[in-house]
Image (tube, helix red, strand yellow):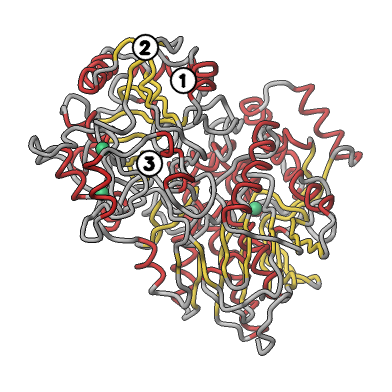
Amino acid sequence: MADIEPVANEKTFEIKQSQTDGEIIAEVTADIATCKDCLNELFDKNNFRYRYPFINCTNCGPRYSIIKTIPYDRPNTTMSAFAMCDKCKEQYENVEDRRFHAQPVACPACGPKITLCDKTGKKIENKSDKVISETIRLLLEGKIVAIKGLGGFHLACNAENDEAVKTLRLRKMRDYKPFAMMAANIKKIKQFAVVDKKAKDVLQSIQAPIVLLPKKEPNTIAPSVAAGVNTFGFMLPYTPLHHLIFAEKKLNALVMTSGNISDEPLICKDDEAIEKLGNIADAFLMHDREIYRQVDDSIVHIIKNELVLLRRARGFVPQTFISKNSASADIFAVGADLKNTFCFVKQNRFIISEHIGDMADASVYKHWLGSIEHLKKLIEANPSVVVCDAHPNYFSSQYARKLKKDKLIEVQHHWAHIASVLAEHNINEKVIGLVADGTGYGNDGAIWGCECLIASLNDFQRFGHLAYYPLAGGDSAAKEAIRPIMGLMKKYNLSIPENILDEIEPDGKKRQTIEQQIEKNINTVQTSSLGRLFDAAAALCGLGSCNNFEAQLPMALEAIADKQVKESYLFALKENGVTTAEIGDMLKNIIEDKLNGTDRKVIAAKFHNTIAEFFFMLAKKAQDKTRIKTVAISGGVFCNRFLSERLIELLQKVGLTVLFNWLVPANDGGISLGQAAIAAKKMNKNKQD
Ligand code: ZN
Ligand code: ZN
Ligand code: FE
């Protein structure tokens, strides 16, 4: 028992919120990690719920994932299938009891049970303790077990067994993307990664998210868990079942990756799991408490000692955010097409959905439609105003345009990014907005990505941006680094030695085609994308030539960048109505450094420093012109800690106030909040602002 650490009974959210003007109210509450009291009972031989995998109370357990409809009462949850026994009922009805009106209350006599099934779904064991010991045995043997959890299935294997992890990669057809892990306790995580005080608090919070932590080297985690990045994603056990598995002290860390097929939604239903995961898992650890809504694990990291969300889902959803703007009509913001979340506004209450995924996948789109209906019903929203991205071809925007509500508002992508920060911090004034992003549709038809805006919730102006370069190839432009490289070569008249280009794209014919496309402006866009510039820099550093998963190359570049290096490359700001950052000199210097044999750790750091500096210079210029002293930063590329921290330092050093995303991700997961905030401001009943 000594090694088992309960999650602390503190609310990360409320602590954070006390630093802003906003407040959080919870109506339908989020799923919460097992509390300390329940954990004590779980391992107390004299308690009638001793070793019961579904122990919970008013302070912990499933909520959002089991609610079918409101009000939040047992008959409206998937627990309606279980009739309470007398003992449970007594606690449920006793005002003095910790389980007073705890809707999922249950015990071994009356509640859900676990079973172990083979990969065809055939039961092989149903005695609770035997199920757990068998599961552990299989995992120690190097087998893959699909474990039904709180918000869906996990695919689990021993994280210290490289053979097992490689098998999982092979069967899941996931070659590179890092896997998340669950470890027994903080002490174990500390053997593998750096855990400071803040990280420890977040790991032990009631949300119990996956926290990205700097790797410790050497470590005993299988190399194939997270190659090419400098962090491990760890979470602590957050259900009684997880605690029972780790309490045997046989496993140090498990890979716990989402039970799904490639980019499809997380699987939460038993039949679908057996059908789709049967080829991946050797066995299923099942239970008979139905999961009504799938909810992924949340992912966070820590920037400047603040918790920053990368994926907002379990534990955080559907907490409501209160704004000082109160909308006169209900609003529905559809979000963006990548990392989609959507958001409803009811008066001054903002309710943001869980992470949905990337809309290009048909099953995600279908799941999105169902999720909209579910949340709408749950919070009784009746939107007459719809907000979407201004992108002509986003699936989400096309859907919004077809809805034919009273009012349709289209919002430029990067304005929505900055608005998400303004919404979180409850700010109506103008700020300098710095956006570091992959792609977003710009007002001029170009693909924007690296922007300096003067923005409020009322409007925005484009103050400056990374100078446009041509990018050929539509969707493959976000994957193949040769495309931005050739666009940048053309824009800045660069010559790159043939052997370097050969390393990145050995197919000379293909390079020629790209060159011609750029030359003739076929299938080519003008872009200020920063994400693609990162791809180019990473490839020039020899870190690969393709994003096998989103941001693989930029993450590899961040991973090697040497934090001790403070130097940067040359760049120029050019005035032409708007200010543009010209980076031809930087690219020339990168190629020179490479030819001189400069360590790529140094090149990577100098590149990051240059980007931070030109953002800083743009902000300084904007400040000189407008006298605005607050800078908001957002956009997916700011998920890069090196870049964010360096830029924040530069801005703070000259006395500027820096705001960044806390409640929603800086990536496109935050777009729906920004869209909703802009619409709510337009529909604001309090006209004094
Ligand atoms: Zn509890
Ligand atoms: Zn009972
Ligand atoms: Fe974006």
For marks 3 and 2, the one nearer the N-term is 2
Q: Badge 3: few (under 14), some or many (20 or more) residues near its Cα, within 10 Å? A: many
Total residue callouts: 3
Tell me the residue that label 2 is attached to: 123
Q: Residue at x 47, y 81 (%)?
A: 655
Tell me the residue that label 1 is attached to: 169
Can you tell which quarter of the image residue 363 is in? Answer: top right
Please name the amino acid that badge 3 sits on: Thr
Q: Residue at x 61, y 80 (%)?
A: 428
Location of residue 313 with respect to 645 vertically, above or below: above
Left or right: 682 in relation to 84: right
Q: Residue at x 80, y 70 (%)?
A: 576
Tell me the residue that label 3 is attached to: 231
Q: Secondary structure at mark 3?
A: strand
The reply to whether the residue tagged 2 has its Cβ within 8 angstroms of ligand 2 is: no
Q: Quadrant of the N terminus?
A: top left
Please name the amino acid that badge 1 sits on: Arg
Which residue is more in the foreground, 314 or 472? 314
